[in-house]
Image (tube, rainbow, N blue to C red):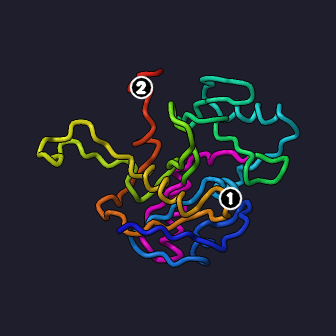
Amino acid sequence: MISLIPVTGIGEVSAGDEIAELVLANAELADYDVLVVTQKVVSKAEGRVIALSGPEDKYRAVLSESRRVLRQRGELVIAETKHGFVCANAGVDLSNVAPGQACLLPVDPDRSARHIRDALRARGGVEVGVIVSDTFGRPWRNGVTDVAIGCAGIAAVVDLRGQPDANGRPLAATEVCVADELAAAAELAKGKSSGVPAVIVRGVDRSWFRESSVRAEVVRGHAGDLFW
């Protein structure tokens, strides 16, 4: 059975803070837990917050964080980030930061997840998976949901191809993005404005625990994308 345990008491995170220490001071982790940490606190800890003096600064930041701009309507820009993510404003976000500031995505979210995972192992003696999550919109669907932008120690995608379905027929194309599913589940316990930046997901299938990467496993290359 899956349990969602919000990590409360962390408070405001600043550049140089160690996420693992903040989590361990406010929660008890066990082996085979998955810690889902919101991108915003990871970016703050890594110093990925910039000052803005006006709308032009935000637009320049979006362009700086983009590999390419796909569409633009007014101030809304749909861009491909340098990580390969396709999202609004290249992840440049003004929510949950001080006025006149913007938060950028981590330079390498997979590396950020590995750092937190390794620090939890060193400081807490626990073997856990770590997911860095962010809120994305989805093509052709209203509403937003959390997805994984980085992971470590927990599968990003579980490949079920070749396994039998309920009627015994082999699955031909089923690859499950369990990292996104765990990120979305954790968001149910975090919320958008509750000040809860991390959630422990307990009861995850132990066969999913392995080395992993969102960038390598989840980001679809242009050659495999019908819409590029």
Q: Which residue is mark 2?
A: 225
Whether the magenta-drawn stretch holds residue 131 is answered as yes
Residue position marked by numbered label 1 in the rendering: 193
Magenta stretch bounds: 103-132
**Location of residue 4 in the rendering, given as x and y in whole percent from the top left corner:** 47, 67
- Which quarter of the rendering shows the N terminus? bottom left
Residue 216 vertical placement versus 133 (above, below): above
Total of numbered circles in the picture? 2
Spot the residue most to the front.
Answer: 142
Q: Of the numbered discs in the image, which one, if any, rests on residue 205?
A: none
Left or right of 112 in this view: 172? left
Q: Residue at x 66, y 74 (%)?
A: 9
Task: Assess whether mark 1 and mark 2 are in contact (beta carbons under 8 angstroms).
Answer: no
Residue 61: give x, y in percent of width and height: 74, 35
For the residue carrying disc 2, how many other residues have a C-alpha within 10 Å: few (<14), some (14-19), or many (20+)?
A: few
Q: Is residue 198 above or below residue 167?
A: below
| Residue 194 screen position, x and y as percent | 66, 63
Camera-side mark, 2 or 1: 1
At 83% from the left and 34% from the top, the residue drawn is 55
